Image (spheres, grey):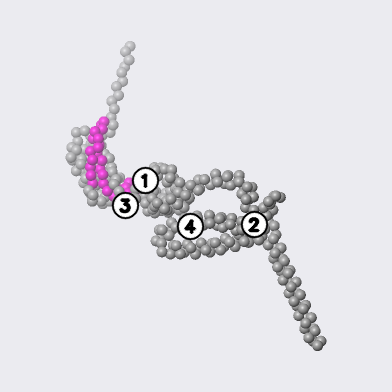
């Protein structure tokens, strides 16, 4: 009997200890979660507690896992170029999704979002004005991805600058000029400036070199020599054949234009230079003069 009573008393004490421990542990956790990090205002105050922070972080983690899963499913069967474009747009869109999730979470747990917006209205207006150009760049980047006006490898001309597109990002486009200089183009330039895409219809483009000869020159011989120079250059395509146009009777010269086709317009400066060297050499051999502007100046001596 004595042993049974001792066991009962021990059991009762154990249960009481468990209850006390549970109450203290949960009480401590609850007290920690209800700890106020920030308190602002008296009427409809904005109160930020540890519980709010934990719930927001938890919702962001869950949303991040879900978005990664969605991105993996969508990009699984996309081509590499389309995959890069989608990931660029997706990386921008997910931040808006995070913001929406945060607002929904705060609203559901009773956080006073309206008071936060009212208190930070002027700040939000200032931030919006400061980020205006950034938002324009990002929206322009989305338009580039959607309408595909520019691709990696295209040769573009914008504001008098020519470059080959190496990388298209959501905010900027990186191009390399013929001088191997990197050209960083804000994407909003595509909306505010005229863009020339030299290779949108293909890599084959037409180039030209203009030349003037003296009056009295044999124009048929000029045409033959220009065609020969173009046909002998290995950087110029033989089909379609080069073309010579008689463009104008100028003040001191007969003007011609040699039109030819190339497969790499980005390097057009090199064959154009070679053609000009050959023009000077062959014209000298065939006694064809390249004139320069001449003016006669008459000085009248005033009468005494």
Q: Distance between the residues labelled 2 and 1?
A: 54 Å
Q: Is mark 1 on a helix, strand or loop?
A: strand
Q: What element carries label 2?
A: loop
Q: In which quarter of the image is residue 209?
A: top left
Q: Is mark 4 on a helix, strand or loop?
A: helix
Q: Name the residue under label 3.
A: 202
In the rendered image, which quarter contains the N terminus?
Answer: bottom right
Q: Which of marks 4 and 3 is nearer the N terminus?
A: 4
Q: How far apart are marks 3 and 1 (CA)?
A: 13 Å
Q: Which of marks 3 and 1 is nearer the N terminus?
A: 1
Q: Give the range drawn in magenta.
A: 242-271
Do the CB atoms of the residues marked 3 and 2 lie less than 8 Å apart? no
- Report if residue 189 lies within the magenta region: no
Q: Which residue lies furthest to the bottom in this view?
A: 1
Q: State the mark number for residue 110.
A: 2
Do the CB atoms of the residues marked 1 and 4 lie less than 8 Å apart? no
């Amino acid at each position: 009997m004595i042993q049974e009573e001792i066991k009962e008393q021990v059991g009762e004490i154990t249960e009481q200890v468990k209850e006390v421990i549970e109450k203290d542990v949960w009480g401590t956790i609850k007290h920690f979660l209800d700890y106020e990090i920030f308190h602002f205002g008296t009427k409809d105050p904005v109160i930020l507690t540890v519980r709010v922070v934990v719930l927001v972080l938890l919702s962001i983690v869950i949303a991040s896992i879900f978005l990664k899963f969605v991105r993996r499913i969508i990009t699984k069967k996309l081509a590499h170029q389309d995959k890069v474009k989608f990931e660029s747009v997706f990386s921008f869109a997910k931040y808006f999704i995070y913001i929406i999730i945060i607002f929904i979470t705060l609203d559901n747990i009773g956080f006073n979002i309206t008071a936060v917006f009212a208190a930070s209205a002027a700040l939000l207006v200032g931030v919006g004005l400061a980020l205006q150009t950034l938002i324009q760049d990002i929206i322009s980047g989305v338009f580039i991805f959607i309408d595909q006006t520019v691709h990696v490898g295209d040769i573009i001309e914008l504001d008098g600058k020519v470059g080959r597109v190496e990388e298209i990002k959501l905010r900027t486009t990186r191009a390399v000029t013929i001088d191997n200089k990197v050209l960083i183009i804000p994407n909003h330039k595509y909306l505010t400036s005229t863009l020339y895409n030299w290779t949108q219809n293909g890599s084959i483009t037409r180039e030209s070199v203009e030349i003037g000869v003296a009056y009295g020159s044999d124009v048929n011989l000029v045409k033959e020599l220009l065609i020969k120079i173009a046909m002998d250059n290995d950087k110029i395509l033989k089909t379609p054949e080069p073309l010579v146009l008689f463009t104008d009777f100028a003040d001191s010269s007969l003007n011609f234009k040699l039109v030819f086709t190339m497969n790499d317009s980005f390097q057009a400066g090199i064959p154009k230079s070679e053609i000009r060297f050959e023009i000077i050499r062959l014209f000298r051999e065939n006694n064809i003069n390249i004139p320069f502007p001449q003016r006669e100046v008459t000085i009248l001596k005033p009468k005494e």
